[in-house]
Amino acid sequence: MSKTYKNFIAGRWTAPATGKYLENRNPADISDLIGRFPDSGPRDIEAAVVSAAKGFQIWSATPAPARGDVLRRVGDLLVDRKDDIARAMTREMGKVLAETGGDVQEGIDTAYYAASETRRLFGNTVPSELRSKWAMSYRRPIGICGLITPFNFPMAIPTWKMFPALACGNSVILKPSEDVPHTATLLVEILLDAGLPPEVIQLVHGRGQTAGRALVEHPTVPVVSFTGSTATGSTIGETCGRMHKRLSLEMGGKNAIVVMDDADLDLALDGVLWGAFGTTGQRCTATSRLLLQRRIHDKFVARLEEAANGMRLGSGLAKDTDVGPLIHQAARDKVERYVQIGKEDGAELVAGGRRGTGTRLSKGWFYRPTIFAGVRGNDRLAQEEIFGPVLSVIRFNSFDDAVRINNSVRYGLSSSLYTQDVHLAFRAMQRLDNGITYVNAPTIGAEAHLPFGGVKQTGNGHREGGWEVYHFYSETKVCYVDYSGMLQRAQIDNY
Ligand code: UN1
């Protein structure tokens, strides 16, 4: 018998009002049933909102450094349980253990950063234009934050949203991807063990169309943060626009590595393999385009082909695995559709282009690391997000061409340039139209204490991580104190 899990609402683990559940299976071996998790609906969200409103009263009245103490203990517990959580995550979503360990580490870094930030939620004091008048701003909590998170970073992304929201004094409702409910459960257990007042956190499992939608549309949830597809982000954006909600969106990417003729090719090769096939290509930051300068193109593609063909597929729990499975059948179907599109558009299949075979791969959603060469900038392979292990190689002549190709997609998350020319490196940082640019490193690997996000249709102007996200989860309040004892009219009595 598999275990049946519950939502966490109003301070206790609660069965869904719908009475319905979704099965959660290991994508490397679908005969391995992890558990049944709630397929929640609007009534569950309603109950979560009622409790979170109480949580907000309690938590917003708690001094920020005391909130920080809880977050520090959360970090400590994540450290203690890192290995167990990493194993559970790999079982649940497939990526290799080193990567799920890194994912937990990102949560740990975010917890300690948030804890320290609670002693630094700065406002400003500025001179008034009038005599004997004090002018200042401070930051206030907002209310209930609805957080909707994807499967690919089951720990890092919920913590990126949740810990700053909590540090600022808000209460939280988390609706994690239905593909990674177990990791979310482990995270909520840690928050409770660390001493978070239970009403401050609610966990509602379920699908985006039902639980996620009810959360976004609830009038008492003024803040929504979503990481996922650009299409879903647009729908959420319409609702939040109509309802005047504060919304942070992190969405798609079509990130490119540019390799110049003068680059250290060994370094670039390692970077491309890690950027394109780490997390089986299922990162918003994944390297899905590779721009090679003409002179090194053929040599580099040949080396890449050999290296990609040598990558070993398997369960992320096995020590010798380089690349784990895709998350589910629909993800693999999508990859297969794009491989077909690539062939029809006349791109040259250099590596992969087929499912993983062999007994240890027969029960999971495996797909070989795939490389297409001869892709043109406007081809669908070069424009659309695939979210799988598919790399499109584009040949270019000059640095200016590379910049133009990099910038000619609707997304703008990360980019990368491999060169030994310091002038080009600085030009790239200026001209590549992305939220993040790496020099001599791949398009993945953002650190928790720097702002994370993209331009164009990748986001809506907000950033996660680092210091900037604290502005998203708090409201600026401005206060004036006139101690002159008389009416002073701004803009009039001072001139
Ligand atoms: C994501 O793919 O949504 O920079 C997040 C990186 C990770 C985070 C990725 N630290 O690749």
Image (tube, rainbow, N blue to C red):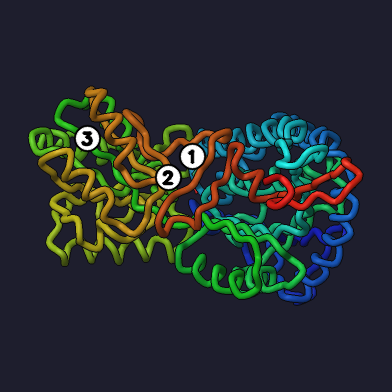
Pointer 3 or 1: first along the chain? 1
- Does label 1 point to a residue whose CB lies under 8 Å from ligand 1? no
123 to the left or right of 228: right
Q: Nearer the viewer, residue 225 or 75?
A: 225
Pointers 1 and 2 in contact (CB under 8 A)? Answer: no
Q: Is residue 179 above or below residue 207?
A: above
Question: Mark 1 = which residue?
Answer: 96
Rounded to the nearest whole Å, what is the CA distance between mark 3 and mark 1? Answer: 27 Å
For residue 210, which numbered disc appears in the image? none
Pointer 1 or 2: first along the chain? 1
Q: Is residue 433 above or below residue 107?
A: below
Q: Few, some or many C-alpha atoms within 10 Å of disc 3 (few <14, some 14-19, many ≥20)?
A: many
* Secondary element at image label 1: loop
Q: Position of residue 422 (x, y in %)?
A: 26, 23
Eye-nearest disc, 1 or 2: 2
* Secondary element at image label 2: loop
Q: Quadrant of the N terminus?
A: bottom right
Residue in the picture at 53% in, 40% down: 451
Q: Position of residue 231 (x, y in %)?
A: 46, 68
Q: Nearer the viewer, residue 363 or 289?
A: 289
Amino acid on which the number 1 mark rests in the picture: Val
Amino acid on which the number 2 mark rests in the picture: Gly
Question: Which quarter of the picture shows residue 12?
Answer: bottom right
Question: Mark 3 = which residue?
Answer: 259
Rounded to the nearest whole Å, what is the CA distance between mark 3 and mark 2? Answer: 19 Å
Amino acid on which the number 3 mark rests in the picture: Val
Residue in the picture at 79% in, 47% down: 479
Question: Mark 2 = which residue?
Answer: 435
